[in-house]
Image: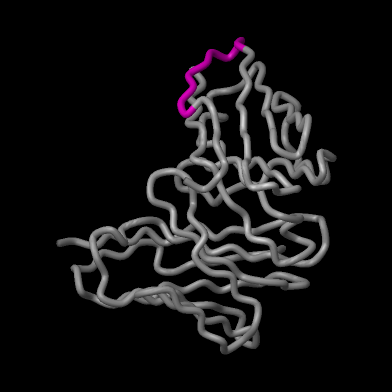
Amino acid sequence: EDKVVQSPLSLVVHEGDTVTLNCSYEVTNFRSLLWYKQEKKAPTFLFMLTSSGIEKKSGRLSSILDKKELFSILNITATQTGDSAVYLCAVQYFGSARQLTFGSGTQLTVLP
Amino acid sequence: ETGVTQTPRHLVMGMTNKKSLKCEQHLGHNAMYWYKQSAKKPLELMFVYNFKEQTENNSVPSRFSPECPNSSHLFLHLHTLQPEDSALYLCASSQGLAGVSNYEQYFGPGTRLTVT
């Protein structure tokens, strides 16, 4: 059975801290891994990762994929209160059986 | 604003009611999706449409009936729902099928459904 596991489930930090969110997966026919940020309703796309070892960066956020060890991390540096959200990891795979498998998410709370 | 809109944003319905959720995307995408998000559970894929044709029905009960009249519009018709169907229903679209190529999905704001 395909699985996507995120850790930690929740995290509370103070502004200025750096956080690392983890996503491990066990899927057949892996194609890509995606990170989303969900604040109140709609998830917002952050990154799509397909190749191992290539860091994707957007401002204070960065992410990298390890296809050998089957995990990805999402780093947020100099956190701000606006970073408070649920961060979702999802895995796409070949074939039409299912489109995406999502993890349960990490609830990040950044305190002022 | 992601280019995907959903109406209504909130809906309260009784178990004997019939209602419909609407999703519209203004991105020129060809694939559209319905997801269900219940409290403290991962997103669950419900239906997938590609070029108006349903490609996936993820074992969804028949009280949920999707309709895709064209690539820009997607409906979810609801009838005789149960209280456990209360959830956030999210619509998404992508240029192509997410499982076929590396097309990211863009989500709408969701409809918060409460079944009483």
Q: Vertical placement of B53 versus A96: above or below?
A: above
Image x and y of residue B81, in percent: 62, 21
| Horizontal relation, residue B108 to residue B65: left or right | left
| Horizontal relation, residue A51 to residue B51: left or right | left
Q: Residue at x 73, y 41 (%)?
A: B47
Image x and y of residue A27, in percent: 70, 70
Q: Residue at x 56, y 47 (%)?
A: B107
Q: Residue at x 77, y 34 (%)?
A: B70
When asked about the image quadrant of residue B24, the answer is top right
Quadrant of the rendering where the C terminus of chain A is positioned: bottom left
| Horizontal relation, residue B33 to residue A44: left or right | right
When asked about the image quadrant of residue B55, the answer is top right
Q: State which region is magenta.
A: B9-17
Number of numbered markers? 0
Q: Which of B41 and B103 is in front in this view?
A: B103
| Horizontal relation, residue B102 to residue B12: left or right | right
